[in-house]
Amino acid sequence: MIKSHFDPSIFLNPLATQVTTSVLGPKPRLTFMSGNSALPPAPGVEPQSQPVHTDADFDHPESPFALVVNVPLIDMDIHNGSTEVWLGTHNTTSLAAQEGKQGDRASGRIAKDLLEERRQQRPPSQPLVRKGSIVIRDFRLWHAGKPNFSNDIR
Amino acid sequence: MKVECSEDLEAVLDRDGSGLQIQKTLVSEQTILDEYLNRGYGNSYNFDQESRLENF
């Protein structure tokens, strides 16, 4: 992280820290920063989704231990590839639900039969998220990057 | 895991009074600019505990 890309309202957001502190306990630790950019499809290439996966691609606790804080820099919707989320799945998932081993390109993939089972209970959604919102999700939540059909980098 | 931050951010990161602890390594801005494109993709990082307690 360099100064010209650093903005405390994003990286040290007090509302985000209040929530993460409530869930994880006092003095949560920030250990990773990254960006997720969904590019418009290249000409002649079929737009693709990520496989539904969890980022916790290892044997993990059954209680909350890590959260991801996302701040979209533009509005996100189905058209430009709002991330698909499978709400509630962090409560029951485990390493046994996954395919692929840690470090593989598509590790943490959720088994197809479990996806279909969950879809009957609560199907996934691609929420409309306004620019500048704060999205806080449990690290274990099932999710998938979706195609960006717009001409903008999402 | 630690976030690599430029040295000129140290004051603002340490001044944050929210209780958020930022696990960081301070390096020069030029080092970050020279090396950031050599990083792995998201899943190549190991988010598990560094010193894992087995059979616990």
Image: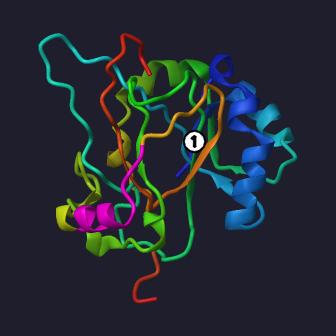
Classified by dominant secondary structure, the portion drawn in magenta counts as helix
The boundaries of the magenta stretch are: A114-125
What residue occupies the far left of the structure in this picture?
A44
- What x and y, as percent, mark residue B41? 34, 38
- The quadrant of the picture occupied by the N terminus of chain A is top right
Judge whether A153 appears above or below B52 on screen: above
- What x and y, as percent, mark residue B19? 81, 54
Identified by mark 1, the residue type is Val
Where residue B39 sits, quadrant-wise, is top left
Query: 10 Å neighbourhood of mark 1: few (<14), some, or many (≥20)?
Result: some
Q: Nearer the viewer, residue A140 or A152?
A: A152
Q: Which residue sits at x=24%, y=48%?
A: A106
What residue occupies the far bottom of the structure in this picture?
B55
> Going by the image, does A78 lie left or right of B28?
left
- In magenta segment, residue A35: no
> Going by the image, does B3 lie left or right of A150?
right
Q: Which residue sits at x=57%, y=69%?
A: A64
What residue occupies the far front of the structure in this picture?
A120
Chain ID at mark 1: B
- The quadrant of the picture occupied by the C terminus of chain A is top left
- In magenta segment, residue A123: yes
Q: Which residue sits at x=69%, y=56%?
A: A20
